[in-house]
Image (cartoon, rainbow, N blue to C red):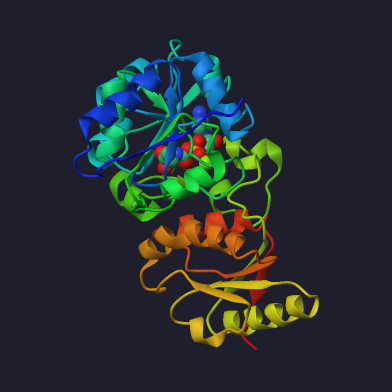
């Protein structure tokens, strides 16, 4: 049954309480509310309401074996979700929350199985966004919220992106403009020693390492090819992800070898009759001839590159290109998250540019 999705414009700094209360009452009644976080827009449902969480999966067309992150507005709510909160997790919460860091903990038996896709662990985080925090607080429950896109698509960094995927499939979207981080939170598994980054994201690996001392990058976080299923501990990671309608290929290596390879591929696809897009950076933008050329920003500002990534992937679809040839960026700071998303969007089609 199609329904109308209500769009509520909300001030990102001082959210209007009447609008937040309306959205919260929908959550409490088992509805689905998309809302901004500092990373991407999430699609929220009451984490303790099994029916609501099932509707959440259905609205996104998300496979039931890929659990959402459960969002809280205060650290102490974690104790109703997790069976154990190790001291290192407490220190991380004090240091990095609210913020783009998700912790995997042993889950409490109070949480419905559907919310954690039958796992004995749970993903929790406290977002750094006044609208998200106000919504969770007014709802009076932890809010299960995957990114508010159709499964497989790039995550939404604006309310327009949410509507492009989910208009008519959800109750409401709170529109507070574009998100600031642009890639999702870092997912850190605290049930193993040393802690392991399962998904690089808005909190850099370098920062976690300097705080924790000992932290591992899981092979899935840095993979340049699909991994055998038995190695895939973060459930969602085996599914197709971040992909625009267009095919994507990533060109990795050093500038200027990248530039030569991108141009070579652009000519190749053009000869085959494809409409060709190039996703590049300010430093190289002038070097390309293609149907559509878009820059992620300067290579010197990887946080800005991360902020622009998902929007530009969606813009290539609007421009109806057949193939996107994307420059790789350095896999450091937020660049690690960018490369992880790009490689997945490409289905691991990676061209290595060699200096000639
Ligand atoms: O920034 C974000 O994290 C955004 C905003 C809305 O908060 N949310 C988000 O949620 O990206 P989602 O559901 O699209 O991604 C959650 C990730 C998936 O890769 C999922 O497999 C992983 O977290 N995950 C969830 N529960 C897990 C668990 N118990 N163990 C390991 N990985 C888990
Ligand atoms: Mg997602």
Question: In the picture, residue 212 is in which quadrant?
Answer: top left
In the rendered image, the quadrant that contains the N terminus is top right
Residue 344 x, y percent position in the rendering: 61, 53
As drawn, the residue found furthest toward the bottom would be 356
Q: How many labels were placed on the picture?
A: 0
Above or below 153: residue 135: above
Q: Which residue is drawn at the image coordinates 53% and 27% (left, top)? A: 56
31 on left or right of 165: left
Residue 193 in sight from this viewpoint: no
Residue in view at x 50 percent, y 81 percent: 285
Q: Find residue 296 and report its image quarter.
A: bottom left
Please give left or right for residue 263 compared with residue 339 in the image. Answer: right
Quadrant of the image for the C terminus? bottom right
Q: Position of residue 271 (x, y in %)?
A: 79, 80
Q: Nearer the viewer, residue 168 or 121?
A: 168
Residue at point 53% right, 49% down? 221
Q: Position of residue 309 (x, y in %)?
A: 48, 60
């Amino acid at each position: 049954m199609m329904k109308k999705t209500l769009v509520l414009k909300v001030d990102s700094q001082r959210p209007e309480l009447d609008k937040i209360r309306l959205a919260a009452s929908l959550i409490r009644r088992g509805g689905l509310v998309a809302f901004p976080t500092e990373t991407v827009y999430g699609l929220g449902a009451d984490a303790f309401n099994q029916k609501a969480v099932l509707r959440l999966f259905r609205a996104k067309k998300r496979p039931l074996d890929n659990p959402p992150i459960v969002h809280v507005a205060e650290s102490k709510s974690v104790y109703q979700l997790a069976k154990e909160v190790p001291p290192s997790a407490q220190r991380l919460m004090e240091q990095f929350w609210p913020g783009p860091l998700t912790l995997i903990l042993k889950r409490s038996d109070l949480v419905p199985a559907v919310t954690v896709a039958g796992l004995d662990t749970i993903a929790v985080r406290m977002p750094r966004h006044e609208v998200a925090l106000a919504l969770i607080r007014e709802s009076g429950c932890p809010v299960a919220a995957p990114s508010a896109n159709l499964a497989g698509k790039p995550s939404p960094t604006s309310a327009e992106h949410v509507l492009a995927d989910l208009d008519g499939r959800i109750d409401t979207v709170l529109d507070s403009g574009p998100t600031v981080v642009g890639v999702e939170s870092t997912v850190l598994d605290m049930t193993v020693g040393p802690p392991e980054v399962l998904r690089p994201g808005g909190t850099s690996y370098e920062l976690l390492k300097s705080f924790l001392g000992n932290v591992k990058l899981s092979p899935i976080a840095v993979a340049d090819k699909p991994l055998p299923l038995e190695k895939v501990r973060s459930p969602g990671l085996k599914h197709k992800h971040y992909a625009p309608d267009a095919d994507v290929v990533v060109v990795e290596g050093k500038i200027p070898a990248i530039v030569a390879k991108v141009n070579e591929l652009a000519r190749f696809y053009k000869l085959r009759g494809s409409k060709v897009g190039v996703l590049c950076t300010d430093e190289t933008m002038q070097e390309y001839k293609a149907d559509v050329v878009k820059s992620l920003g300067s290579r010197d500002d990887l946080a800005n590159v991360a902020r622009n990534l998902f929007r530009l992937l969606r813009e290539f679809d609007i421009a109806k290109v057949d193939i996107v040839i994307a420059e790789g960026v350095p896999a450091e700071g937020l660049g690690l998250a960018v490369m992880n998303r790009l490689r997945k969007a490409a289905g691991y089609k990676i061209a290595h540019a060699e200096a000639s």
